[in-house]
Image (tube, grey):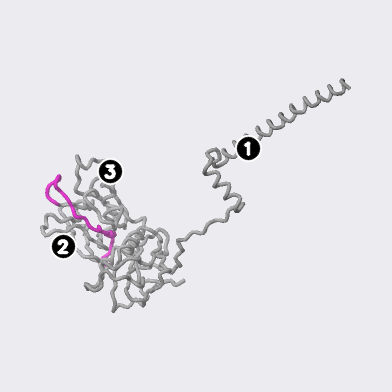
Amino acid sequence: MIRVFLGFAGVCVNDTSIGLTLRCPRNNYIIYKPDVVAYNKVDCDDDGCVGDTTDLMVQKIKCQQKGSCSIIPPRYFIISPRAMNSECSFIKPKSLSFSGGLCMRNNSVHNICDGLNNNQSISSKEFIIRSHPSYPWHYNQDTFIPKNKDKYIHLMNSCTLVYYPHDTSNRILLTVSDIDIHVSEDTDSTDSINVTSGCMTLNMSINNTENGKSFIIDLKTLSDRTIYFRFLNTLPGILESRTNGGRGFVICVKAIRSDAEKGTSACEGMITSDLKADEFKEKSTVLKARPRKGGKKNRRKRKKCKANRKCRRRGKKGKKNRQRKNKKKKGKGQKKQKTSGKPQDKGQKGQKKTG
């Protein structure tokens, strides 16, 4: 087994019968952003074509939100090359590479659009806000509508999370780990994340926010310490509101006291870079037939049984019924033998009298 840690060179698998097992070493941590790609060269050479295939993309998405998962070698062509090179499209991969990834603390994650009421509150010192439960599968218009509401009658265009910071905290540190939400040329029709408290408003969208960017909210300047996080579908009109969706977002929130913590990331401790990978031998899909008792005799009986309706029953009930029938047949046979012996005795007695 080859164990790989983030920061090392990684591992290259060029055998179609060998896959990768990804796992987070800590309990209650789930896989986040695994860096696994396909190469068109056997030695995972960067000079060749590198990218994703359809089956590899699906496997990586399914791996997220799990503590461990298995990735088998891709079977299809590269459709999403990392370098914009037309020659790399629709080329069959020959190797699979792992070069790292992240793990996320699962019990710290709160989905702002949870699908139930889309309106919740929290008072933890640190936590992670995620756009929707099925992240990173793309969200859509239905993500903003709670399950107990009729989407044709009560159309919602926002999800809300209310945060009550600790009294000992002076500032709130926000770090955007990932953001991919609907964007449009018209700024009024772009999905956004709004952070509000009293007169303070912080608007985050793809236009003004990038991965890794941090924001600081000074609680001393706020009249109300309650902070509202809203994920808005800001397309004009309620009935006509639609969104093209996106992967969603992951934002880390942390209450801090001193100025020394300003330069740090709010994701420290909640998102770690210790994702591991092990090689595994892919099992054959060919199943071996189990040896059956009785050999050829039982096979012949089963063939006859297919043509006969009476013996098609299986299980304990069928066996019991057949046993009862056999006992009845044996009992009838014994009775016939006894009755057939009586006239012979009478005949013998008659012969004696005549003699």
* Residue underneath mark 2: 207
Return the residue found at the far right: 355
Does label 2 or label 1 sit earlier along the sequence? Answer: 2
Residue 160 shown left or right of residue 322 in the figure: left
* Amino acid carrying mark 3 in the image: Lys
At numbered mark 2, what does the secondary structure look like: helix, strand or loop? loop
In this orientation, which residue lies closer to the viewer: 84 or 270? 84
When the figure is inspected, residue 99 is found, relative to residue 159, above or below; the finding is: below
* Amino acid carrying mark 2 in the image: Asn
Give the class, few, some or many, for how many residues have Cα within 10 Å of label 1's Cα (few <14, many ≥20).
few
> What count of labels does the image hold?
3
Q: Which image quadrant is residue 317 in? A: top right
For image coordinates 60% across by 53% down, the residue present is: 295
Can the viewer see residue 278? Answer: no
For image coordinates 23% across by 40% down, the residue present is: 150
At numbered mark 1, what does the secondary structure look like: helix, strand or loop? helix
Name the spot of residue 6 as percent of width and height, x first: 36, 71
- What's the distance in space between the residues labelled 2 and 3, CA to CA? 31 Å
When the figure is inspected, residue 243 is found, relative to residue 322, above or below; the finding is: below
User: Which portion, as a residue range, is magenta?
Assistant: 235-260
* Residue underneath mark 1: 323
Any magenta on residue 256?
Answer: yes
In this orientation, which residue lies closer to the viewer: 34 or 305? 305
Mark 2 vs mark 3: give the one in front.
3
Any magenta on residue 18?
Answer: no
* Residue underneath mark 3: 147
For image coordinates 14% across by 51% down, the residue present is: 235
* Amino acid carrying mark 1 in the image: Gln
Does label 1 or label 3 sit earlier along the sequence? Answer: 3
- What's the distance in space between the residues labelled 1 and 3, CA to CA? 56 Å
